[in-house]
Amino acid sequence: MLITSVSNLKIKYINKLKNSKFMNSEKKFIVEGKHLVSEAKKNNILLETYSTDEVNYGVNNTLVTNEVMNKISDLPSFANVIGICKFMDLNYTLGDKIIILDNVQDPGNIGTIIRSAKAFNFDNVILGLGCPNMYSSKVIRASQGMIFNENIQSKDLSIFIPYLIKSGYDVYGTDVNNGISIEKINKKNKIAIVMGNEGNGLNPDLSKLLDKNIYLNMNSDCESLNVAVASSIIMYEINK
């Protein structure tokens, strides 16, 4: 079967999956390109594919024209294959090292942090309720497929952070004025790091829940770092 019309019902359905609310109701999401489709297949969540050429990922494939692929692809230069996937089964186990994101808005930052969390052996990435959907195409692409290999959960941080503290975690915010150098923290303890919004930092209401803060030693001419860069350096230091 070859789909030639952008008005085809299947094509309209795929485009609707780009909407976070519809995505959540259907419990399905989109991946684009051979690498991400292959990663989805490895993790047994690939349901079907759509492509401009014949492909075989062990699921039903539907051929589409370049015009149709251009309609459903979010890439600047469209991929020749996309996959429709089911949501992953969540693992609610909490490990010893957790990175928590409070209202981080840029999907690219979130994807990069997920990738770094896997690289530096952090057990969980926790997304606050103000963060973008973990299954958004930009998050998935920025993670380079690590979204399939890292434990990611969404939580109400006003409830989750006190729970962690009661459970014996050292939960750190990031504050250069009221913190200690990351080099001085006890890395043997269970640790959670809370990273704030790109422009506004941590929500003041969440900051009040924390009694510990850390900062990175850096050149005084540099006022701040991008949240993904700062998160990656912090996770690297804790992993050392």
Image (cartoon, grey):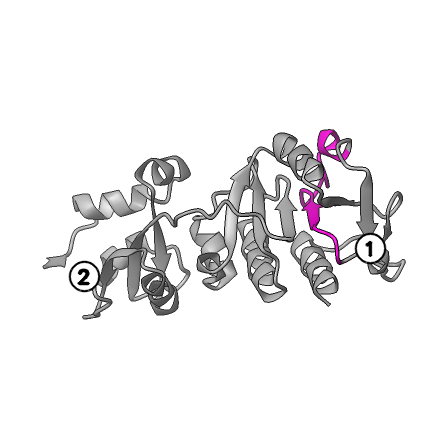
Element class at badge 1: loop
Q: Is residue 7 visible?
A: no
Q: Where on the picture, by quarter, is residue 155?
A: top right
Residue 92 located within the stretch drawn in magenta: no
Relative to 21, is 168 on the left or the right?
A: right
Looking at the image, tell me whether mark 1 or mark 2 is earlier in sequence order: 2
Residue at numbered disc 2: 61
For the C terminus, give its image quadrant: bottom right
Q: Residue at x 51, y 44 (%)?
A: 153
Residue 192 located within the stretch drawn in magenta: yes
Label 2 is placed on what type of residue?
Asn
Disc on res. 185: 1
Q: Residue at x 31, y 63 (%)?
A: 41
Residue 216: image x %, image y %? 82, 57
Label 1 is placed on what type of residue?
Ile
> Given contact means CB atoms under 8 Å apart, are the residues at marks 1 and 2 in contact?
no
Residue 181: image x %, image y %? 86, 55
Q: Where on the picture, by quarter, is residue 127?
A: top right
Disc on res. 77: none
Residue 98: image x %, image y %? 63, 50
Relative to 200, is 214 on the left or the right?
A: right
The vertical placement of 46 against 158, above or below, is: below
Magenta residues (range): 188-207
Q: Nearer the viewer, residue 60 or 125?
A: 125
How crowded pointer 1 is (Cα within 10 Å; few <14, some 14-19, many 20+) is rated as some
